[in-house]
Amino acid sequence: MKKREYSRDPELVIRMAFTSFLLLLLYIAFVSLLWWAGIPPIFIIVIGIAMAAFQVFGSDKLVLMTTGAKVVSPQEEPKLHAMVERLAALAEIPKPKKIAVMDTHVPNAFATGRSPKNAVVAVTRGLMSKLNEKEQEAVLGHELSHVKNRDVMVLTWASLIVIMAGYLLQMLFWMSLFGGFGGGGRRQEGGGNAFIYIMAVYLGTIVIYFLSQLVILSLSRYREYAADRGGAILTGSPMHLASALQKISSDIVRIPEKDLRQVEHANAFFIVNAIKGNKMAALLSSHPPVEKRVQRLQKMHREL
Amino acid sequence: MVFRVLFGRNKQKQVESKRYFSIIDAAGSLTKRSDIVVTGNAGLVFTPVESDFFVNLDNEIFDLLRTSGHRARTSYEIINDEFGTRWVTLNNSNLKDLATTIHLVGTMITDQGFGNQLIAATFRFDFEGKQSYFIYNVKQGNFYPLVTAGDRERDNMAEMQLRIVMDEEKIPCEQNLENWYPLWGIPF
């Protein structure tokens, strides 16, 4: 069997490198700001690292809980397990510890976990019923690429600055409620000067907070492209991932098959009017638009 | 009691009724369309509860039709389905009268205090030769299309086309596709 190699897309690598560089600048700016104001950064950094570590370690359990995904055994879903096993072997990572299924008819999938040795991969019932096998494989390939690239860990640690900035903002807010900063200021010339320092830190942190969010979202989008690429190389078929993405993002797959009478009896009927067509700026999306992802996959298909 | 009727329940009912009336308003235009053949069948599905009213439903509907003057041209049936719910099915070749009568039956059930038991009103027709329905979800106050194809299968593409038809006929369509729950085995 031909060994699959991960070839790098130079343009994507450059973009990710640049994004990481911006992030580094923001980290330096943040630490400098704290140092200038005489606030020992070590305290914030330690708390931030603790929170980020908590996130990385708890991600799988938390996501399983919030999505309602149920772990399934090889006996319960033999085909799914076989597919994941085969792809993991090709990707040269261990088979994910947990494979889970979400009970919704809308096709989707996710992967999480702190490392390839502690990975969780989940799919929805809709994915298994509405996509054909090749398309399902393509989606799983994408997810396993995330696992192999350690994206959960990378993105969580990248967002360390957001965690730290956010924590600092919270702290400043509570402290200002309870009568202001005691002796954190560099100059102890009475309330006035300390106030200016605090305000500067507050405003500076807010700016850094928002800029970091944007940079991290950008990084997240590039990681998605990379996972698309990795998955396509893994399965050898970028076009199946492209068609899977189009199916997943299409309107039609959202139409349910469950009888209205079953729904009515299962729970009080919610008046859900989802805010459809929410045109949020592309800046604020953690995933690139489907058209762009499909374009890149088509380009790959021509080159492979 | 008066205030609740004036400001609370009544207002909500009015809003929902207005949306329902769109099918009465569109009846003539729908009938004239070349891609739609009205079959004259419609039904109201609800979850019955223990009460004299539901035991006597047949008589109640008979009386309702008689007093409303629709008796002559409307035939009806009461059918239990496998979901534990019950249908009042009506047949009247005039879509406008049919839709109006469905509304009367629904209002009668609601006036008796059983409005919460109503699930949906459904209208059958052929769309480009395909077995199709407009489903009106009572609680949501919106219509959405259902085109069946074979056993428990939907023709989503045809439903997308029907959505356009509904737009043209000014029938309010449920925006969220995830709420387009089908009704399988509609008895008409």
Image (cartoon, coloured by chain):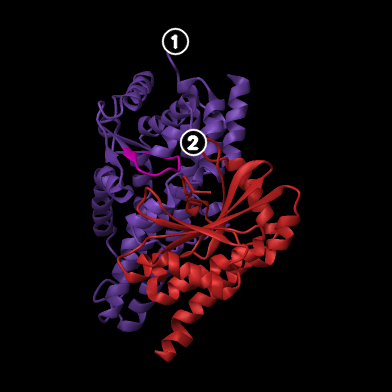
Chain colours: A purple, B red
- Where residue B126 is drawn, which disc sits there? none
Q: To which residue does mark 1 refer?
A: A2
Q: Horizontal and vertical percent for residue A132?
A: 48, 27
Q: Chain of mark 1?
A: A
Q: Secondary structure at mark 1?
A: loop
Q: To which residue does mark 2 refer?
A: B151
Q: Secondary structure at mark 2?
A: loop
> Is residue A108 highlighted in magenta?
yes
Q: Horizontal and vertical percent for residue A254?
A: 50, 46
Q: Horizontal and vertical percent for residue B18?
A: 59, 72
Q: Amino acid at mark 2?
A: Asp
Q: Is residue B61 in view from this perspective?
A: yes
Q: Is residue A35 in view from this perspective?
A: no
- Residue A73, image quadrant: top left
Mark 2 near mark 1, Cβ–Cβ under 8 Å? Answer: no
Mark closer to the observer (2, 1):
2
Q: Amino acid at mark 1?
A: Lys
Q: Horizontal and vertical percent for residue A52?
A: 28, 49
In-front residue for pair A253/B80: B80
In-front residue for pair A23/B59: B59
> Mark 2 and mark 1: span between their CA atoms?
44 Å
- In screen coordinates, is A38 left or right of B128? left
- In screen coordinates, is A146 left or right of B159? left
> Is residue A84 highlighted in magenta?
no
Query: What's the magenta region?
Result: A101-110
